[in-house]
Amino acid sequence: MSGRRARLVWFVGLWCAGVATLAVIAFAIRAVIF
């Protein structure tokens, strides 16, 4: 059970990091375009 929970926490952390990276990239592109 703990292994599954650790994997879930790792997956959520990775997903949040990916979303944050995409948000930063989109903000940078918008800043460059506009």
Image (spheres, rainbow, N blue to C red):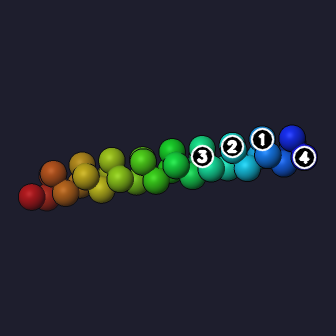
SS at mark 4 in the image: loop
What residue occupies the far right of the structure in this picture? 1
- Label 2 to label 4: alpha-carbon separation: 14 Å
Q: Residues within 10 Å of mark 2 (few under 14, many from 20)?
A: few
Residue at (84, 48) in percent of width and height: 4
Amino acid under disc 2: Trp
Amino acid under disc 4: Met
**Where does label 1 land, which residue?**
6
Q: Earlier in the sequence, mark 4 or mark 1?
A: 4
SS at mark 3 in the image: helix
SS at mark 2 in the image: helix
Q: Earlier in the sequence, mark 4 or mark 3?
A: 4
Where residue 17 appears, as percent x and y from the top left, is 51, 45
Q: Are marks 3 and 2 in contact (CB under 8 Å)?
A: yes
Amino acid under disc 3: Leu
Q: Quarter-wise, where is residue 6 in the image?
A: top right
Q: Earlier in the sequence, mark 2 or mark 4?
A: 4
**Where does label 4 land, which residue?**
1
- Label 4 to label 1: alpha-carbon separation: 9 Å
Q: Quadrant of the C terminus?
A: bottom left
What residue occupies the far left of the structure in this picture? 34
Q: Are marks 1 and 3 in contact (CB under 8 Å)?
A: no
Q: Describe residue 2's horizontal placement relative to residue 10 as left or right.
A: right
- Label 1 to label 2: alpha-carbon separation: 6 Å
Q: Are marks 1 and 2 in contact (CB under 8 Å)?
A: yes
- Label 3 to label 2: alpha-carbon separation: 6 Å
**Where does label 3 land, which residue?**
14
Residue at (33, 47) in percent of width and height: 24
The foreground one among 33 and 17 is 17
Amino acid under disc 1: Ala
Residue at (40, 54) in percent of width and height: 22
**Where does label 2 land, which residue?**
10
